[in-house]
Structure formats: C-alpha cells, structure tokens
C-alpha cells in the first residue's frame, strides 16, 4: 500500500524521497486540511534536528523501526515542551515538562511527530464534538447527502480523520470504551486497542485509569503491528503495566495460521442491527471460511449490563482523576476572592458540558449512601462480564462483532447523551474485560460510508489477533474497493 | 430512585453550576441514573468486585533515585507563583 510504513521506509531507503521532503509533504497537506484534525501542527523548524538525524541513519544504512515516519499524536499524550491540552479549556495553556512513556518509545524508534490530534475533551465522547477546539470533520461524505459534515467518531476523532485523509502516516489514540476502534471504523481505517496493561499509561492525561489504554490508528494491520512493537513495553511508572513477555508482532503477520481457528459471533450483538451492518459480518464469514476457519454462534449473558457498568465506573474514575484540575498548580485559573472560589470558578469555567456531566455522575455514584448500590455493584458486574468473556474463550479463539451499530452521522445530530453513549455498545464490553480488540474496515454502507468489524482476542494474544485481522484485511480488500 | 440533590453533588465535585443550568444537569443526571439502574436486579451476593482486569502487574524495581521535575519545571506551569511556591489567596487569618 502506497502510504504504508514499510512502503515509505523503502522509498526513504532507496532515496526516492528524503525525510525532510516527506515531512514537508505531510505538513503541507495537514496545513491546508479543513477537517480540524490537529490542535497544533509542528513546523519543520521544531523537528529539524530529528529529521536530520533520521536522514543520517538512512544514509548510514541503519534506520530505526519507525525512522522518519510522520505521526499524529492524540492531544492526550504529554509531549515535552509541546502544548498538551486534552482538548479542554482548563489545560489550554499546559506545556508538559516530560514525555509520556508511549510517545518517548515512538521517538526512540525514529518517528517524527507532525502535531497533536484534536479529540473529545478529556477523551469523553464518541463523536469528537466535545472538544474545546471545535468538532473534527470526517473526510468521508455521505454520497446521498454530500453537503453534510459528518463526525469522525471519538474520542480519538482527530487521530482517525488525520490518517484517513493522509495528513499523517499513522497516529496514536487512546481507548477507554471504544475511543480508538469506533473512530477507526467510522473513518475507514485500522484501530487497535491492546490488552489493558500492555502500553504504559504514564504521561497520558487520565480519564478512567482501570480502562484507559493507548493504541495505534493506521492504514493497515501491518502498520498497527509495527507501532505496537515500539510501544508495547513494561513500565515501572505505571503500576498496572503488565510484565508479561512481549513478542514481535509484525514478523510473520501474513503467515498462514498454523492451527484450526474457531471464531465466535455473538448472536445477541446482532439483534436489531441494520442490513448494512449485518452484511459486514456475513461478508467476513464468506471471505474467511475458505481458510479452514470455523464460525460458531455464541451468546453473552451480560451484554445488556455492559453500558450501565461502564457509565458508572468510567465517570466515577473520571471524577476522581479530574479532581487535580484546581487552577492552582497548572492549567487555566479563574480568579476568586478565596482559595475555594478559585477552585470553583476554575473548574466550572474550565470544563465543558460533557465533562461536567460525567464528573457529576461520578460524584453521585461515589457519594455516601450510593457507593455500594452503584459503584461497588458495577465493579462486581464487571467481574461477571469478564467471566462471561472467559466462558466464551474456552470454546473459541476470537470473537467477531461489528465495531459500531451505525455509520458516521451528521455533526450536531445526536444531542441526547444516552443515544451517544449507545455508539459504544460493541466496544465497551471488551474494554470492561480488558481484552484486546482491533477494528478493520470491512465495506461501505448504502450511503457509501465506511463500516468496520471488530476482532476480539484473549488476553495478551495480540500476535494471533493481528494475524487474523491481516488475513481478513487481505480477503475483504477494503482499500481496493 | 431517590431525588438527586444537584447542589450537593456539584459541591462535592467542586463545581458551581450556573443557576440556569442546574435543571439541565439535574434532568440529565436523572435520566442516566435511571438508565444504569438495571444493574440493581443482578444478584452479586457471591461476586467479588473487580479492580484490575489482568492482575499481572506485580513488579519489583531497584530503589534508585532519578532526577525529574525540578521545582522550576513544575512551577513553570503554575498560574501564579511566588519564589518557589504556588501562590493562592490568604487562607489563614
């Protein structure tokens, strides 16, 4: 594929293009883009040293794994000396004095950051409409109503739109309840959420710490594997960082699967879905069945409780995590006569509506008299959801689902928060269980908009998960459609 | 479900909702709490709460000092400072 990491690396190696020319090309395109995918773009002067060092490594014949590759970074990752806002007013002037673990690994492997991607405020949203810097526009258009501006999904909406329109080669996002997979699906690209604990959360602006996970948004499954190779490392600075042995996820990604594979399709997920969505699953089945892959129906017992569980736990953790924004130590201060007034004014004026709503939900479910009935009960149901997945994985290797219940919708169309929350119905259960999930583009809707499918794997089985996703990608051939 | 005291909840969250928005948030909260109320019907008397999904994270490191976050680094982001301190209005009479 023309814009794949390996193709670009070959062009750099063969001197068809220089690292500097490559950066110029992407930056020029990003600057002229009208999608609002970036909160900040980095001029060449900001990166000139890294560009020159990268070029030197190519000339010496020893390029690093991601050498010279222009990446977009969700504006939720702290980047040293570069404004990091979480798309919130309250952090709109924040310049971190350290680099997040994940972005440091990407720099160590030679990649060059082109800018910070727009996202929902504090990653709370499914449409990128809650950003303080305005909504992101999906580069795709409904062929029947081409004048409508559509959402890219969220919360990593800027990261997804930027890859889809080609203003960066790949981007980094974070996924708490679907924030990588859902926008990837709505923008027709690949999005991977690794197993919780794979990629360190250190230096990522915290939303819900028991769920947040970093992952790549890319043009291909192979690119996702290449980036995962760089960022999937143990880190002592994150107490939930797993210390399991990591594999090389890219090598052998296209090898024939050596065992008989069984894939479960949850029948309860497919009740009431549209024909467009159903046909994504049917087409995938047809494409894979010739590879000696068996499909079986499976049924979860806990699906109807997943969103409720999520919308108790995530806001509870958020209300606690966002207590740090007080107008005293960093971020925007709104003045007041007393210390308490500064807290109240800074927080009330600094947070947008959706973030305020979630802080209030969190404060409510954690408050005296409600803690056991909501928060503790949700944590118990979370265990039942995890057990439910493990029961299914006793019998199958992967689970196949649609990524989203619908195609990209019009900006401003979904005003009711609950109907917005339902966008994540297929991605939230995986997040609660902490399992890895990947969304790949599978086809177009009757309106000509991209739709995606999600493969879910068992804990830390990203290698196998990427192999099956690569096979499906090849068979479905979305990019040639 | 009992009534939601939006003033108390916003105070707990250190937010001062503008008067005209209290009803908006109060209704929104009510809808969402009603929506998540379906969890109450599940019997979890035998179930332990789940805090960490993978439970593969016990790591031991050497106790070594490394330098990060100098006072100046940290205070550079402060809205107001005085010498090496964060500056706030007087809190003790």
Image (cartoon, helix red, strand yellow):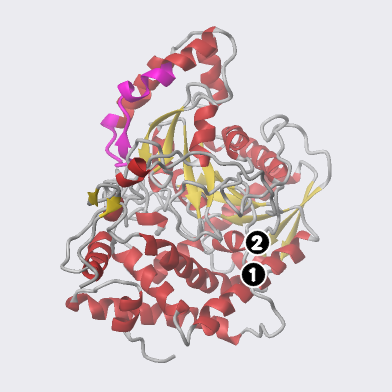
Q: Are marks 1 and 2 in contact (CB under 8 Å)?
A: yes
- Relative vertical location of residue A180 with respect to residue A314 in this rendering, above or below: above
Which chain letter goes with mark 2? B
* Residue A39 appears in view: yes
Left or right: where does residue A19 sit relative to residue A284?
Answer: left
Quadrant of the rendered image containing residue A75: top left
**Quadrant of residue B87 within the rendered picture:** bottom left
Residue A286 in the image, given as x and y percentages of width and height: 68, 47
Task: Count neighbours of disc 1 (C-alpha within 10 A) and say few if under 14, some if 14 to 19, many if 20 or more.
Answer: many
The numbered mark at residue B50 is 1
| Residue drawn at 25 percent across, 47 percent down | B83
Is residue A480 something one can see in this rendering?
no
Task: Write the residue at 32% across / 57% down.
Answer: A130
Report the disc number at residue B53.
Answer: 2
- Identified at 36% across, 78% down, the residue is B29
Q: Where is residue A98 in the image (x, y as percent from the top left)?
A: 43, 39
Whole-percent x, y for residue A316 in the image: 47, 70
């Amino acid at each position: 594929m023309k814009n794949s990491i390996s193709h670009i690396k070959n062009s750099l190696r063969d001197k068809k293009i220089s690292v500097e020319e490559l950066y110029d090309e992407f930056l020029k395109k990003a600057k002229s883009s009208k999608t609002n995918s970036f909160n900040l773009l980095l001029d060449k002067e900001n990166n000139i040293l890294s560009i020159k060092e990268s070029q030197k490594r190519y000339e010496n014949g020893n390029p690093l794994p991601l050498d010279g590759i222009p990446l977009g970074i969700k504006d939720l990752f702290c980047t040293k000396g570069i404004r990091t806002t979480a798309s919130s007013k309250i952090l709109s002037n924040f310049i971190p004095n350290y680099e997040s673990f994940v972005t440091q690994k990407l720099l160590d492997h030679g990649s060059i950051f082109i800018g910070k991607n727009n996202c929902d405020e504090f990653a709370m949203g499914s449409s990128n409409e809650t950003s303080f810097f305005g909504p992101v526009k999906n580069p795709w258009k409904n062929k029947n109503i081409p004048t409508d501006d559509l959402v890219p999904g969220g919360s990593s909406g800027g990261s997804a739109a930027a890859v889809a329109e080609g203003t960066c080669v790949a981007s980094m996002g974070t996924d708490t309840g679907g924030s990588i997979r859902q926008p990837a699906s709505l923008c027709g690209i690949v999005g991977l959420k690794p197993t919780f604990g794979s990629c360190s959360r250190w230096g990522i602006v915290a939303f819900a710490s028991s769920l947040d996970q970093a992952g790549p948004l890319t043009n291909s499954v192979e690119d996702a594997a290449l980036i995962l190779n760089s960022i999937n490392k143990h880190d002592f600075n994150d107490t939930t960082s797993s210390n399991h042995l990591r594999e090389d996820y890219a090598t052998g990604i296209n090898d024939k699967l050596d065992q008989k594979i069984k894939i479960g399709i949850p029948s309860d997920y497919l009740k009431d879905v549209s024909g467009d969505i159903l046909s994504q699953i049917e087409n995938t089945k047809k494409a894979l069945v010739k590879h000696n892959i068996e499909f079986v129906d499976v049924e979860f017992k806990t699906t109807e409780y997943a969103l409720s569980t999520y919308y108790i736990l995530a806001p509870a953790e958020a209300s606690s995590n966002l207590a740090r924004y007080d107008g005293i130590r960093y971020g925007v201060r709104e003045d007041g006569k007393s210390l308490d007034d500064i807290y109240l004014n800074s927080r009330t004026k600094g947070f947008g509506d959706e973030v305020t709503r979630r802080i209030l939900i969190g404060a409510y479910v954690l408050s005296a008299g409600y803690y056991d009935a909501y928060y503790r009960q949700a944590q118990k149901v979370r265990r039942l959801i995890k057990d439910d997945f493990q029961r299914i994985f006793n019998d199958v290797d992967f689970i196949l689902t649609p990524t989203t219940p619908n195609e990209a919708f019009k900006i401003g169309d979904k005003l009711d928060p609950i109907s917005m929350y339902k966008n994540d119905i297929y991605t939230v259960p995986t997040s609660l269980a902490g399992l890895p999930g990947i969304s790949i583009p599978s086809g177009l809707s009757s309106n000509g908009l991209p739709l995606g499918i999600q493969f879910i794997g068992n804990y830390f089985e990203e290698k196998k998960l990427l192999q099956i996703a690569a096979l499906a990608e090849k068979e479905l051939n979305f990019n040639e459609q | 479900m009992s009534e939601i005291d939006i003033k108390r909840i916003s105070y707990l969250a250190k937010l001062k909702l503008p008067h005209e928005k209290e009803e908006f948030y109060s209704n929104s909260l009510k809808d969402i709490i009603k929506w998540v109320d379906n969890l109450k019907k599940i019997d979890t008397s035998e179930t332990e709460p789940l805090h960490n999904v993978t439970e593969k994270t016990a790591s031991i490191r050497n106790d070594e000092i490394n330098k990060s976050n100098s006072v100046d680094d940290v205070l550079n982001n402060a809205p107001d400072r005085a010498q090496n301190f964060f500056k706030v209005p007087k809190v003790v009479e």
